[in-house]
Image: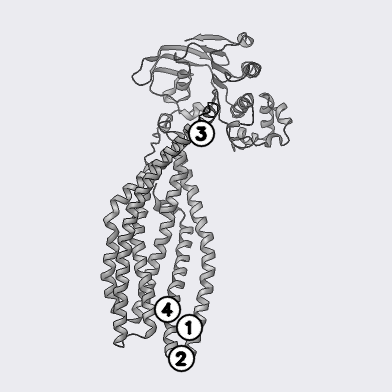
């Protein structure tokens, strides 16, 4: 991933922006050229030539106004379309990472990539590139216009341009380094704010609002401090570069005045060349600084490139349901250098049967489920899926057969329908059947908007039981026939918990493995085996 890649990918919009910049800078330079001609003709009292150039100036202004309007529209389209592509590519890379790599960073870091880092790419990538394109074209047109009046000025411009272009290079490494630090602090701030606001309820009901305010201030000041440092080095660079530019303009203006004194230039050329020199040196000033600023987006794209994607290895794919059993053989697992969580665990889970795993905290109940769904991989032993080792089976194809339901499943800020379908093309009849099977139908019928009712982020306007049913519906709709329950009903009141557990355990097509601390009497007679760990 790099900035140039996306410019090429959106080459049509990039080309439109370049063409509009060419038109804009032509209008800008022609304004100065026509002004010089008008002054010369006013001085010479040539009224016909004056009228001719005045008409051309009015035409130039009209085209310029129309170009400004078009550029505003197409610039936003260029930026927003490319932003969408970058976000899509980052998301794809994250989806292609192993779970253990993904969880090394907090969710806030990834949100920062898709928001703060994209904003920085817009500010120091697209905005600056737009300036650079305009500056290059402006310099070319201005040089041509200046040479039209007197060729000798070109040599002075070249010598002065060398100084202007090289001035920002004194600050190159420092600017890139400080910009990278700003990106890191943006990421840290997002992480901190996510952490703080996740604890809103705890702090609110402990009357510790000051702690929240202080944390927000402390985290914000870290970013502010880094932005001050960047502003300092950026300000020094701007001062040096602009100072060099202004001195160059004075030198060029002095040369133009001497050429006029010796009769080598018309009076209007003084105004024109002063105008063009301002465009040239301000363009060179901006160009040299902007090219340096554009390189500040490189560390951001490098960070995206460092996302470790899973290696593409040809593995077996499961195309049919479980036929016989899932057989755990001598499974050993430990977290880091800690004591073993699983020690030679062996058990054969048969198709269609219902199992409950109980035991004290820290005995490996949840770990067992996480190994089965592929969250944890560094275990010893073998897990056989119908006599096939799951290490040799594509993880996606395993997940296609399993519903994993934890204590707090995620519900999206979308309609009930979208939360179940997740944009897949599934017939409405099949959807309605699943809704009925999981017991959502009576509730949905009471809602004014029915299945199109919008659920708030993470299901804040629905009950825990409704959350669980929606997630179960997602899985059943996709023909998943193994359900793993990880303390999934522990936060529900007893009546709702029993209702959901009975619905799951009474389904003869499902193989159920439930981890719980609370085995309810109402479902004991529905269980094939209880495994104590």
Near mark 3 (Cα within 10 A), the count class, few <14, some 14-19 or many ≥20, is few
Query: Label 1: which residue?
Result: 53
Quadrant of the image occupied by residue 31? bottom left
Kindly report the distance in space between the C-alpha atoms of the residues bearing marks 1 and 3. Answer: 64 Å
First of labels 4, 2 by sequence position: 4
First of labels 4, 3 by sequence position: 4
Horizontal arrangement in the rendering, residue 444 relative to residue 284 (left or right) = right
Near mark 2 (Cα within 10 A), the count class, few <14, some 14-19 or many ≥20, is few
From the viewer's side, name the closer residue of 368 and 36.
Answer: 36
Residue drawn at point x = 31 percent, y = 88 percent: 263
Is label 1 in contact with label 4 (beta carbons under 8 Å)?
no
Residue drawn at point x = 35 percent, y = 44 percent: 181
Q: What SS does tag 3 mark?
A: helix
Kindly report the distance in space between the C-alpha atoms of the residues bearing marks 4 and 3. Answer: 59 Å
| Label total for image | 4
Horizontal arrangement in the rendering, residue 131 relative to residue 58 (left or right) = left
Query: Label 4: which residue?
Result: 33
Q: What SS does tag 4 mark?
A: helix
Q: State the image coordinates of residue 142 (x, y, percent, origin top left).
A: 38, 73
Query: Label 3: which residue?
Result: 197
Q: State the image coordinates of residue 384 (x, y, percent, origin top left).
A: 45, 18
Residue drawn at point x = 43 percent, y = 37 percent: 109
Q: State the image coordinates of residue 359 (x, y, percent, origin top left).
A: 49, 11
Is label 4 in contact with label 2 (beta carbons under 8 Å)?
no
Kindly report the distance in space between the C-alpha atoms of the residues bearing marks 1 and 4. Answer: 10 Å
Whether residue 304 is visible to the viewer of this picture, yes or no, is no
Query: Label 2: which residue?
Result: 46
Q: What SS does tag 1 mark?
A: helix
Q: Is residue 233 above or below residue 326?
A: below
């Amino acid at each position: 991933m790099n900035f140039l890649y996306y410019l090429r990918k959106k080459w049509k919009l990039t080309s439109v922006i370049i063409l509009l910049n060419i038109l804009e800078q032509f209008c800008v330079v022609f304004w100065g050229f026509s002004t010089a001609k008008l002054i010369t003709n006013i001085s010479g009292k040539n009224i016909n030539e004056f009228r001719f150039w005045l008409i051309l100036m009015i035409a130039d202004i009209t085209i310029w106004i129309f170009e400004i309007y078009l550029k505003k529209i197409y610039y936003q389209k260029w930026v927003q379309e490319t932003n969408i592509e970058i976000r899509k590519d980052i998301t794809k890379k994250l989806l292609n990472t192993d779970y253990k790599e993904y969880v090394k960073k907090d969710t806030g870091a990834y949100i920062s990539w898709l928001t703060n880092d994209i904003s920085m790419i817009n500010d120091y990538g697209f905005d600056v590139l737009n300036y650079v394109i305009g500056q290059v074209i402006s310099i070319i047109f201005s040089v041509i216009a200046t040479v039209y009046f007197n060729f000798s000025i070109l040599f002075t411009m070249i010598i002065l341009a060398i100084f202007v272009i090289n001035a920002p290079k004194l600050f190159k490494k420092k600017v890139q380094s400080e910009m990278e630090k700003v990106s890191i602090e943006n990421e840290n701030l997002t992480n901190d704010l996510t952490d703080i606001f996740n604890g809103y309820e705890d702090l609110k009901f402990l009357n510790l609002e000051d702690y929240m305010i202080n944390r927000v201030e402390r985290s914000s000041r870290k970013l502010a401090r880094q932005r001050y440092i960047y502003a300092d080095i950026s300000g020094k660079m701007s001062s040096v570069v602009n100072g060099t530019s202004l001195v160059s303009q004075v030198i060029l203006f002095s040369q133009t005045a001497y050429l006029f004194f010796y009769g080598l230039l018309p009076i209007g050329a003084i105004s024109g060349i002063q105008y063009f020199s301002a465009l040239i040196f301000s363009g060179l000033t901006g160009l040299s600084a902007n090219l340096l600023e554009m390189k500040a987006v490189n560390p951001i794209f490098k960070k995206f490139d460092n996302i470790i994607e899973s290696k593409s290895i040809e593995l077996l794919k499961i195309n049919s349901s479980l036929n016989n059993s899932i057989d755990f053989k001598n499974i050993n697992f430990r977290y880091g250098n800690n004591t073993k969580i699983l020690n030679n665990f062996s058990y054969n889970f048969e198709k269609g049967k219902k199992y409950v795993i109980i035991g004290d905290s820290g005995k490996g109940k949840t770990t067992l489920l996480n190994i089965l769904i592929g969250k944890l991989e560094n275990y010893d032993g073998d897990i056989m899926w119908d006599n096939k080792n799951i290490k040799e089976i594509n993880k996606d194809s395993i997940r296609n057969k399993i519903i994993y339901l934890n204590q707090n499943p995620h519900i999206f800020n979308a309609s009930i329908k979208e939360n179940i379908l997740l944009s897949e093309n599934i017939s409405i009849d099949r959807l309605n059947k699943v809704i009925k099977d999981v017991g959502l139908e009576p509730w949905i019928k009471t809602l004014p908007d029915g299945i199109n009712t919008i659920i708030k982020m993470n299901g804040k306007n629905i009950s825990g039981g409704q959350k669980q049913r929606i997630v179960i519906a997602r899985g059943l709709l996709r023909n998943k026939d193994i359900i793993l329950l990880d303390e999934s009903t522990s936060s529900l009141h007893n009546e709702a918990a029993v209702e959901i557990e009975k619905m799951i355990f009474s389904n003869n097509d499902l193989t159920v493995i439930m981890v719980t601390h609370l085995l309810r009497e109402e479902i004991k007679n529905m269980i094939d085996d209880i495994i104590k760990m």
